[in-house]
Image: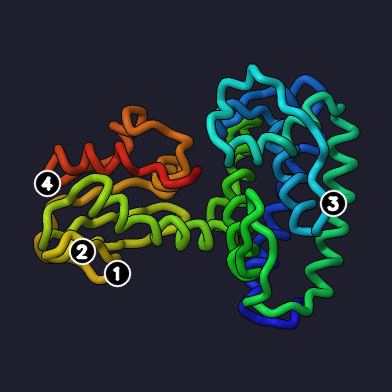
């Protein structure tokens, strides 16, 4: 147990997803590690390498000294370059090497989380040399691990854990981005409301309200006259929001009532992960 209860939820969710990832990849044969995942340009091996690398950074390990190839077409920003380093350095590791390093990293992280004495506001490193609070770092790890667990499940055809602890943290993280998507990115008109009705393993109804100044807020109260209502299942919601599904591929999975043009703009801007 961590000392601070506010961190325990994130620790538990991260541990659950990490253990699930290890269970998923343990039986894979060498060729299956090369399967593509919904995470753009990453294979199963790449995705697990990313998971290992980010957990090592939470442990405070030094980053690898490594030069990226120049022909990685999907690396288009400093953030992508930062993330790719931990992936590319493991690109030729074998299946046994990957599972062994994952298991060892899990043991180290479990020990760290058990013995954590820092408070939620403690400052830790963030990507690109920035800093963030420990609470934010742990929250984003729980979010990231659950999303990548789902990526792996899609890649190897083993769905599950759609309502595990990490799913609810992911829901909350994605909902925080919703006002910007609706009000700013999609340009919903002032003094309007947009309703999202999500069903499935994680169910929720949320209304994004745009005030007279064009600023958006989100709440759980229904709207009597929304300009548009979008209904979809939880899998569609998180895959769209995490950039794992294009809006054009979700046409048959999203029911739209109201302004079709605004709904199209919202779905076009729905992806909020880097």
Is residue 46 left or right of 194 when viewed as pictured?
right
Instruction: Pick whichever of labels 4 and 3 is earlier in the sequence.
Output: 3
Residue at 12%, 53% (x, y): give it. Answer: 189
SS state under label 2: strand
State the residue position of label 2.
Answer: 209
State the residue position of label 1.
Answer: 219
CB under 8 Å between discs 1 and 4: no
Q: Nearer the viewer, mark 4 or mark 2?
A: 2
User: Measured from the top left, where is residue 63 in percent x and y?
Assistant: 79, 46
Q: Nearer the viewer, residue 57 or 28?
A: 57
What whole-number distance in Å separates the C-alpha atoms at marks 3 and 1?
39 Å
Farthest residue, direction front: 129
What whole-number distance in Å separates the C-alpha atoms at marks 4 and 3?
49 Å
Instruction: Pick whichever of labels 1 and 4 is earlier in the sequence.
Output: 1
CB under 8 Å between discs 4 and 3: no
State the residue position of label 4.
Answer: 258
State the residue position of label 3.
Answer: 105
What whole-number distance in Å separates the C-alpha atoms at marks 3 and 2?
43 Å
Farthest residue, direction top: 71
């Amino acid at each position: 147990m961590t000392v601070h209860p506010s961190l325990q939820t994130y620790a538990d969710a991260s541990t659950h997803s990490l253990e699930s990832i290890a269970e998923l990849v343990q039986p894979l044969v060498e060729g299956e590690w090369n399967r593509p995942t919904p995470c753009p340009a990453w294979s199963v091996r790449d995705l697990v390498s990313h998971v290992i690398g980010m957990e090592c950074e939470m442990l405070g390990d030094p980053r690898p000294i490594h030069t990226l190839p120049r022909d990685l077409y999907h690396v288009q920003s400093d953030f992508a370059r930062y993330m790719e380093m931990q992936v590319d350095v493991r690109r030729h590791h074998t299946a046994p090497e990957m599972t062994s390093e994952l298991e060892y990293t899990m043991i180290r992280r479990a020990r760290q989380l058990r013995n954590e004495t820092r408070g939620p506001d403690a400052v830790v490193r963030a990507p690109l040399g920035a800093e963030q609070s420990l609470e934010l770092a742990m929250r984003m790890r729980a979010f990231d691990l659950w999303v990548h667990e789902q990526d792996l499940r899609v890649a190897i055809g083993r769905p599950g854990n759609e309502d595990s602890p990490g799913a609810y943290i992911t829901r909350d993280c994605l909902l925080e981005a919703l006002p910007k998507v609706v009000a700013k990115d999609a340009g919903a008109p002032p003094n309007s409301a947009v309703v999202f009705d999500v069903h499935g393993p994680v169910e929720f109804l949320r209304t994004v309200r745009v005030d007279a100044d064009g600023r958006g807020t989100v709440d759980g109260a229904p709207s009597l006259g929304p300009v548009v209502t979008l209904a979809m299942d939880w899998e569609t919601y998180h895959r769209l929001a995490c950039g794992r599904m294009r809006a054009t591929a979700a046409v048959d999975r999203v029911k739209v009532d109201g302004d079709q043009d605004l709904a199209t703009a919202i779905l076009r801007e729905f992806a909020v992960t880097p």
